[in-house]
Image (cartoon, rainbow, N blue to C red):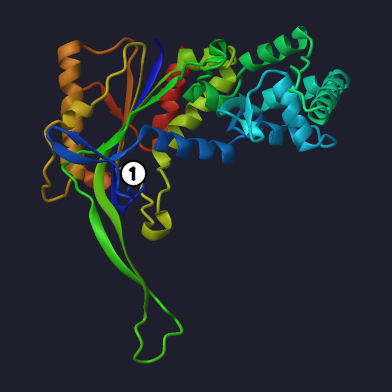
Amino acid sequence: MNVLEIHLIQTVPAANLNRDDAGFPKQVTFGGVPRIRLSSQSQKYAMRRRFREQFDRSKLGVRTRQLARALTEHLPDVELGVLEEALELVGFKLKKGVLDTLIFLSWGQVEELAELLRANWGTIEQTIMANREAQVKAEEGGKKAPAKKSLPKGLVDEVQRLLLKAKAGDIALFGRMMASLPEGNVNAAAHVAHAFSTHAAYPESDYFITSDDLAADGEATAGMIGERSYSAATLYRYAAVDYTELVRGLEGDQALAAEFLKAFVEAFVKELPGGMQSSHAAYTLPEAVLLVAHAGEPRSLAGAFDRPVTAGEGGYTLPSIRALLRRWQDLETMYGSRPASTARWVALPSLDVRLPDDAGIVASRSIEDAMQDVVNAVTRR
């Protein structure tokens, strides 16, 4: 394996970045106490959103049920309803004009599919018209509609082969499952853990009113009374990327893999889920970052917080950092260093964190320096 791991300690003030179906901040019980949690999928969605701003879409995928709508960009002269019928003919299952399940394709695949449909449009259009005419005749005669005519098997097979391709950075990182076409599954190169508070933490309630701006003197000004949940927490966040798998998912394109590896690290460090940010503005960055490149097995440091951290004079941040480093050193002592290990550390200077002498970690001057060192260590092997 050729792995890059990211460990973060990050403090978030009053916020509800990732809520459950009842509107409460998501939670998990760990070490016998409740913790505030950010789901894996919410963090990945925030990163994918950043990628859409950072990369040309030709390097990305699109996850949608609106495939016919995506194709209209390349086939503007074809009506949407006709495209929906064409998709059914080439093997897609649709309900009310959309795919019955989400599909994750590269934008390149969408364009290739449009070109394939255009190249065979004469045959496709004839088949659609024949099926429509047969349907009308059956209805006029009060008969059961006949079985629909099919396209040549070679064309349907060509569409299936096209779907197996998936050269897109976000698909290679986060994976793809295609239940109807298992050969098109893509193993995720990036594994993102659910973030959780290093200490016991509970949701709290914010009671609020919405005032009526035109209420007259003496009238009740509360046009609405409500309650919302929020929480505050110091989080441990963790992710690991198998660079070998990333290169494989990008069909051996090492330059593109290196580009997305760096983008992933930067996005994981700098992005958070965006739930209710307009009400909380909890825009924080990590206080401490540990980046590790190696050729061994991934090692989460979550066990450092099985015993909940308690607040000292500096709150939860500094005790959490110390617990993280102790866990790192314990695992290094018990299991040994992993092959070709490069570990870089960055923390807020005011925290005055002293690294253990024998931890094998080198302090970097900036997060950019740390990222560059570990990305180079992974990609140049």
Q: Please, is residue 86 above or below residue 28 in the view?
A: above
Number of on-image labels: 1
The quadrant holding residue 79 is top right
In this view, the residue in front, 143 or 224, is 143
The quadrant holding residue 285 is top left
Residue 198 percent across, percent down from the top left: 20, 38
Furthest toward the bottom, the residue is: 217
In this view, the residue in front, 311 or 32, is 32
Residue 215 percent across, percent down from the top left: 42, 85
Q: Please, is residue 56 above or below residue 131 in the view?
A: below
In this view, the residue in front, 227 or 166, is 227
Whether residue 357 is visible here, answered yes or no, is: no
Q: Residue at x 40, y 43 (%)?
A: 272
Q: Residue at x 46, y 84 (%)?
A: 214
Q: Is residue 14 left or right of residue 139?
A: left
Whether residue 372 is visible here, answered yes or no, is: yes
- Give, as a three-letter code, the residue at label 1: Asp
Residue 162 percent across, percent down from the top left: 68, 15
Residue 231 percent across, percent down from the top left: 26, 51
Q: Residue at x 73, y 22 (%)?
A: 144
Q: Secondary structure at mark 1?
A: loop
Furthest toward the top, the residue is: 154
Q: Please, is residue 28 above or below residue 313 in the view?
A: above
- Which residue matches tag 1? 20
Which quadrant of the rendered structure holds the N terminus?
top left
Other-residue count near label 1 (Cα within 10 Å), few / some / many at <14 / 14–19 / ≥20: few
In this view, the residue in front, 227 or 365, is 227
The quadrant holding residue 277 is bottom left
Q: Is residue 108 left or right of residue 166?
A: right
Q: Is residue 246 left or right of residue 109?
A: left
Furthest toward the front, the residue is: 142
